[in-house]
Structures are given as C-alpha cells and as structure tokens.
Image (cartoon, helix red, strand yellow):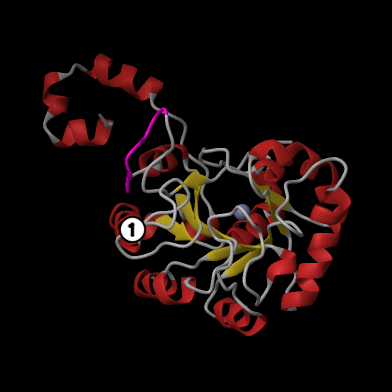
C-alpha cells in the first residue's frame, strides 16, 4: 500500500513517530521528472502501418489526444504488404500522403527494417543501414529510431550498426518499462495484446505496467499492429479497438496531468538533449 493512502485512511494515528520515520527511511527515491515536470511517460507504437489504422486506431487517438507512432518497413510504403507468412500479408500499407497527414497530427515514425526478414550480421547493412535512407526517401521525413522486426534475435546485430547509421534509439519487444537511465539502443515495449501465446495465455490488462511506471518515473511504450473492432487480427499481436480505448481511458484516468503523452521520437530527442539526467 502506498504510504499516502495509508495515512489518508487514518493509519498515522496507529503509528509511533519512530515507525513513521522508519517508513520514511525506506521510501523509494523521488523519480526524475520528464519534460514540463511530467512524472512518467506514455507512448504507443504500431508495427507495419496498415492503412486500416486510419479507420480504427486514429479516431481513438484523436478522441483521447494521444499521439501515435508507426514502425514502417522501408520497402512496403503505399503498397499491399508483401511479407508472406505474416498475419498482415496483403494488407494495404499507409502511403506517403497518409503518413504526412499523421505527422501533422503529431504522429511519429521509425524504420522497421528494409524487408522484415529478420536482422542478422550478414544483412544488417541492408536491413538497418540502407533501410533508413530508403524510408527517408520514401516518406520524406527524417528517421532516427530503428524498430527491430520479428523477434529480439535481430537486436544484437542491429545494435552493432545502428549508431553508425545515424539512429539515436532502438525499440525492441523486451517487455519492460524504460527509465531515463535506460540504454536508448535497447528500449523495451509493452505488448498490448488480447491474449499471450502459451504456456501463459495472459488475458488483456488495461492497467499493464502503469503503476510500475508511476512509481519508477518510467516510460511505457506500448506496441501492437492494427487493432480491429471486436476481434483482433492475431490475439498475440494485437488488441481490439475496444481494448485500445480501455487502455487510453486508464492512461488518462490514472495519469491525469502527471503523464507526458508523447511519440517516442519526442522522448528520445528530449533524453538526448537532457543528458544530465542520464547515467554516464
Ligand atoms: Zn513487424
């Protein structure tokens, strides 16, 4: 129980000053503040960038005033996605004009490799380095974040070339809350999925990691692909639009004025320019 809520319930009357002092001495450090004095940060990312986002996710973003972020495969802009075997194969991907429209609304973008084949030491020059330039040319926007495609197996090979390629950060699918001291080249993302694969089969949780982020002064980056009404495209890769809205309601209700709602590019840029907050 938080000390404040214990006191609010009259707990102080039951405790000696010594006991109170002991609690004080073990209370957690005060988390570092973020931009504009915010206490924690919330971002959400969508991998692949299906055009259906415009129908199903973007209206919910507008309603709650939360910016989004799309991780785009550089070779797949404005065409039906051509990655056989993927749940999203054949879905039309956002085109340059639609991407520019989202950018005007505060959305951000990152590179999700050149072909989504999985990054290895052998292909990293194409899938990570060349992919950045190809995407920048295709959408006419600067790109400074790499989002690892597929599994985290591509993370170590991507890390070896990302800084040299000009990326400031890498998004993975390690499920964790990021801190101001986190390695920008190893940022975690929280899966916002209807149900996890076995053996756990975790059910959707709209509160996931929110209280951890508040206590640690951390940064949640949710991730999914393309929420759809009533039934997810893939229960372990997506949530429904109803679940997405429930998540945003909880972020706003619990976060109030304390949460900074931001595209990951904004957060990375802020962290890079506030280096005094970062561990050496
Ligand atoms: Zn992907």
Q: Within 10 Å of the Cα at label 1, are there few (<14), some (14-19), or many (20+) other Cα atoms?
A: some
Q: Main secondary structure of the magenta part?
A: loop
The x, y position of residue 269, in whole percent, is: 67, 59
Helix, strand or loop status at disc 1? loop
- x and y percentages locating residue 59 in the rendered image: 39, 75
On the picture, is 230 further left or further right than 32? left
Q: Within the displayed image, which quadrant is ligand 1 positioned in?
A: bottom right
**252 above or below 280?**
below
Residue at 46 percent of width and 37 percent of height: 216
Q: In the rendered picture of this protein, how many numbered marks are placed on residues?
A: 1
Give the position of the N terminus as an image quadrant. top left
Q: Quadrant of residue 18?
A: top left
- The answer to if 200 sits in the magenta stretch is yes
Residue at mark 1: 231
Q: Is residue 92 magenta?
A: no
Name the foreground residue: 274 vs 112: 112
> Going 63% across and 39% down the picture, which residue do you hit?
181
Position of 252 with respect to 12 (left or right) is right
Instruction: Provide the residue span drawn in magenta.
Output: 199-206
């Amino acid at each position: 129980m938080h000390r404040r809520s214990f006191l609010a319930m009259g707990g102080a009357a039951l405790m000696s000053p010594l006991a109170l002092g002991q609690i004080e001495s073990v209370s957690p450090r005060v988390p570092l503040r973020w931009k504009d004095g915010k206490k924690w940060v919330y971002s959400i990312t969508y991998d692949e960038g299906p055009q259906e986002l415009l129908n199903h996710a973007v209206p919910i973003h507008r309603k709650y005033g939360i910016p989004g972020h799309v991780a785009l495969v550089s070779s797949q802009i404005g065409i039906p996605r051509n990655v056989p075997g993927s749940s999203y194969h054949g879905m039309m991907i956002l085109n340059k004009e639609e991407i520019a429209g989202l950018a005007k609304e505060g959305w951000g973008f990152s590179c999700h490799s050149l072909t989504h084949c999985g990054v290895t030491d052998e292909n990293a020059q194409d899938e990570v380095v060349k992919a950045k330039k190809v995407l920048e040319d295709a959408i006419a926007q600067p790109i400074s974040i790499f989002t690892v495609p597929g599994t985290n197996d591509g993370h170590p090979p991507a890390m070896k070339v990302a800084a040299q390629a000009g990326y400031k950060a890498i998004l993975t699918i390690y499920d964790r809350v990021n801190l101001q001291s986190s390695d920008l080249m190893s940022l975690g993302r929280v899966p916002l999925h209807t149900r996890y694969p076995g053996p756990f089969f975790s059910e959707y949780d709209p509160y996931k990691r929110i209280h951890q982020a508040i206590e640690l002064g951390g940064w949640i980056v949710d991730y999914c692909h393309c929420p759809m009404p009533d039934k997810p495209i893939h229960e372990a890769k997506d949530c429904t639009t109803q679940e997405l809205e429930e998540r945003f309601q909880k972020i706003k209700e619990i976060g109030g004025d304390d949460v900074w709602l931001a595209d990951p590019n904004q957060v990375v840029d802020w962290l890079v320019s506030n280096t005094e907050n970062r561990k050496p």
